[in-house]
Image (tube, rainbow, N blue to C red):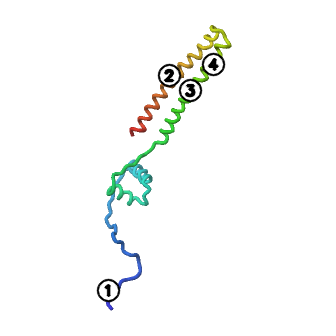
């Protein structure tokens, strides 16, 4: 019996398609952070599998959602409900002034409320503009 023709029964079975070729890329810090975020979103087991999948199988599409911007937009949108509640209170105050006070005294009491209302309307317009700008930023990015 020749020792060269005898197969050994120990060790790992050879792979059908061994991965022997190695490629290397260099990234700066910003690109590396972006790569790590994309890798985490991909749910791949290894960097190698992630890169091979990106390069060979499909174009990579990663959607990043800016949670803080969305939360901020939601908070701004909640102001609309608050303004409706203020409007209801405003109507109740006017009705109370009309029934409990004379017309002259009611108008005198309404003057400071009118100034505050004008400021509130200007504030509401600025919030509405911010909401529009924020939505454009979120959905155009």
- Per the model, the C-alpha gap separating discs 4 and 3 is 14 Å
Specify the quadrant that holds the C terminus.
top left
The mark nearer the N terminus, 4 or 3, is 3
Percent x, y of residue 135:
44, 35
Q: Which residue is mark 1?
A: 5
Image coordinates for residue 58, horizontal then vertical, percent: 33, 54
Q: Quadrant of residue 98?
A: top right
Q: Alpha carbon of mark 4 to alpha carbon of mark 1: how far?
A: 103 Å
Label 2 and label 1: CA atoms lie apart by: 91 Å
User: Counting residues from the N terminus, which is met first, the one under dot 4 or under dot 1?
Assistant: 1
- Up the image or down, 40 lies above or below 123; here it is below
What is the x, y in percent for residue 96? 65, 17
Query: Residue beneath label 2, please?
Result: 122
Q: Quadrant of the N terminus?
A: bottom left
Q: Which residue is mark 4?
A: 93
- Residue for badge 3: 84
Asked which secondary structure carries label 2, the reply is helix
Q: Residue at x 61, y 11 (%)?
A: 107
Mark 4 residue crowding within 10 angstroms, few (<14) / some (14–19) / many (20+): some
Residue that lies at the very extreme toward the top in this rendered image: 104
| In the foreground, 92 or 139 | 92
Q: x, y (%) of residue 113?
A: 59, 17
Residue under the point 47% across and 28% down? 128
Question: Count the marks: how many?
Answer: 4
């Amino acid at each position: 019996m020749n020792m060269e023709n005898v197969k050994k029964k120990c060790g790992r079975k050879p792979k059908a398609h061994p991965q022997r070729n190695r490629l290397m890329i260099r990234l700066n810090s910003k690109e590396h952070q972006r790569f790590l975020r994309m890798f985490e979103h991909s749910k791949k087991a290894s960097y190698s599998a992630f890169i091979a999948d990106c390069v060979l199988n499909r174009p990579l599409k990663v959607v990043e959602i800016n949670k803080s911007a969305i939360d901020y937009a939601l908070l701004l949108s909640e102001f609309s409900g608050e303004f409706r509640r203020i409007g209801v209170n405003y109507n109740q105050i006017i009705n109370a002034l009309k029934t409990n006070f004379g017309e002259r005294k009611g108008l005198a009491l309404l003057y400071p409320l009118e100034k505050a209302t004008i400021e509130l309307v200007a504030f509401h317009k600025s919030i509405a503009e911010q909401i529009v700008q924020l939505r454009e930023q979120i959905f155009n990015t």
